[in-house]
Amino acid sequence: MVLKGLCERIVSSKCSSKSSTETVDNTQVPVYSKAGSSDSSEKKAVPSRSSGWAAAVRKVVTGGSMRRFQERVLGSSRTDISSSDGDIWLLGVCHKISQQESTGGVDTSNGLASFEQDFSSKILVTYRKGFDAIGDTKYTSDVNWGCMLRSSQMLVAQALLFHKLGRSWRKPIDKPLDKEYIDVLQLFGDSEASAFSIHNLLQAGKGYGLAVGSWVGPYAMCRTWEVLARKKNDLGEPPLPMAIYVVSGDEDGERGGAPVVCIEDASKRCSEFSSGLAVWTPLLLLVPLVLGLDKVNPRYIPLLRSTFKFPQSLGIMGGKPGASTYIIGVQNEKAFYLDPHDVQQVVNISGDTQEPTGTSSYHCNVMRHIPLDSIDPSLAIGFYCRDKDDFDDFCSQASKLAEESNGAPLFTVAKSRSFSKQVSNDVSGDNTGFQEDDFPGMDCGNDTVTNEDDWQLL
C-alpha cells in the first residue's frame, strides 16, 4: 500500500505492481546493520521512452525506494543486536545472550548463534510476482496489498512446522531436508493447487471482505483461516491437521470486553474437527485484538511481551497501518519480525529433499526489529497447542498473565459458556485471571465489562 501511494504521487493512479523487481536478501551470513542500507546487487532501471510512468515506477522500486518507504512506515527498523538489552524470546524459546546475567566472563556467543539459527529457520512468506492470475482477475502479483495475507501464511506455516517437526527443529544446512518441511512449503505455493495459497485465501475470505488488490485487517484474516480450514480436500480430509479456534468477543466481532478463551468452546472445536472421534485434537488459537486507537495502549506492552514466553507462542500478525509483518520474538523493548514486503519471483517447490529448488526464498537471515510499542494496535496473536495437556498449560499461563494485568487483560480464560445474558464479574477487580480451580464458577459470556475506551474487538 505504501508503494501505491508513492506511485500515485510520482506518476499516475495507474501504477502497476507488475513492475516490481525488488528481491530478498537470502545470504547465509547474519546481518547486523541498519536495514535501510542499499543492496549493491540491485539493478538500475532502463528508462522506457514509450512508457514514462512505467519507467518511473521501475526507478522507484529498483532504486531501493520501496524498501526505504516501507521502513519509513514500519519505523526505524534495525538489524543490530545487543547482549546488553537482555535475553531474546523467540516463539516460546529463550536465547540467553544477556551479559547482565553472565558471571565470570561467560561467553554468550552460543546464545546468539542459537538465536540466529532459530530465526533463520522460521518460514518467510513474501510478496510474489509471476503466478497464475487470481480468479477471473488479471492480478499475477500481490505486491502492494497482500502483506496481511502473507503474514498470516507465515503464522500458520509455523504452526504446521511445530506440529510436524516440533519446536526444536532447525533447517539443516548441509543435510537433506525433512520431507515434512517440504510438504509444509508446498501448501503455501502460489496457485489454486496449493491448499493455503493466496488464491484460496481470497476465495475463502469473500464473506469477510477479502478482495484482490485490497488490504485486510487481522480479524477478517483470522476468520478467513477458520473458513478455509473447514474445507475438505479431494480425499474428504481437512487441509489443516488441527482444529482452529478464533477467540473473540462474539461471532460478528462487535465491540466488547476482553475476549474469553472458553474451554468448552475449544473442546467443541476439537470434537467437530475429529467428527466426534476424539476428545481432543491439536489446536490453533487465533486472538484478534485492537489495543488502542492510534497506538498500543502502554499498559498492554508488558502483556504482549510476555506472550512470547508461552511455550505455545506463534507470535503476532501485526506491524504498522498498511504494512503488516509477522512478529516472532522480543528482546526487552524490541520486536523481531519477518517482513513480507520484499518481492520475489514465484517458485515451485519440488518434492526432492536432496536438492529442492526455491527453498532459500522462504528464509531470511536479516534479523530486523522495531520498537514493540510502535506496532499497530490492530493485531492478532497466535498459539499452537499440541494436545490437551499443552492446552491446559496454555490456560494456566494465560490465567497468570491476566492476574498481572491490573484489570486490563489481553484475554481471559473460563470453563463454560453462559447461554443466558448475565454480566460477568468486572475485570477491573481481583477476578482478572482465573486459575483452573476457579473455572467452574466462570462463564464464557460476551458481556464482560472493561474500560470502553481501551477495548475494541475487530
Image (cartoon, rainbow, N blue to C red):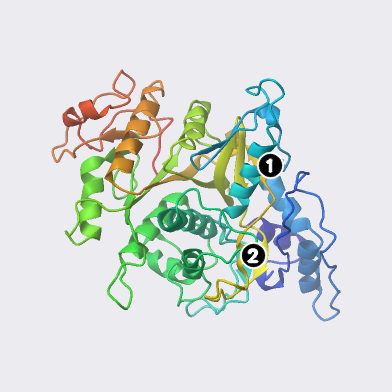
Image: 93 above or below 57: above
Q: Position of residue 80 (x, y in %)?
A: 73, 39
Rendered image quadrant of residue 23: bottom right
* Quadrant hosting residue 404: top left
Task: Identify the element where label 2 is drawn.
Answer: helix
Where 139 sits versus 291, above or below? below
Q: Is residue 258 left or right of residue 39?
A: left
Q: Secondary structure at mark 1?
A: loop
**Which amino acid type is shown beneath numbered disc 1?**
Gly
Q: Is residue 75 above or below residue 361?
A: above
The spot of residue 333 in percent (x, y) is 61, 31
Which residue is label 1 attached to?
75
Residue drawn 55% across the image and 79% down it = 132
Residue 141 seen from this side:
yes
Q: Nearer the viewer, mark 1 or mark 2?
A: 2
- Mark closer to the chain start, 1 or 2: 1
Q: How many marks?
A: 2
Residue 236 in the image, given as x and y percentages of width and height: 27, 74
Q: Are marks 1 and 2 in contact (CB under 8 Å)?
A: no
Label disc, if present, on residue 60 of the rendered structure: none
Front-most of 86 and 285?
A: 86
Mark 2 nearby-residue class (10 Å; few <14, some 14–19, many ≥20): some
Q: Is residue 375 left or right of residue 238?
A: right
Q: Amino acid at mark 2?
A: Ser
Relative side of 106 to 126, left or right: right
- Taking the spot 82% from the left edge, 61% from the top edge, the residue there is 63
The residue positioned 29% from the left and 41% from the top of the image is: 389
Q: In the figure, is residue 181 to the left or right of 444?
A: right
Q: Which residue is mark 2?
A: 361
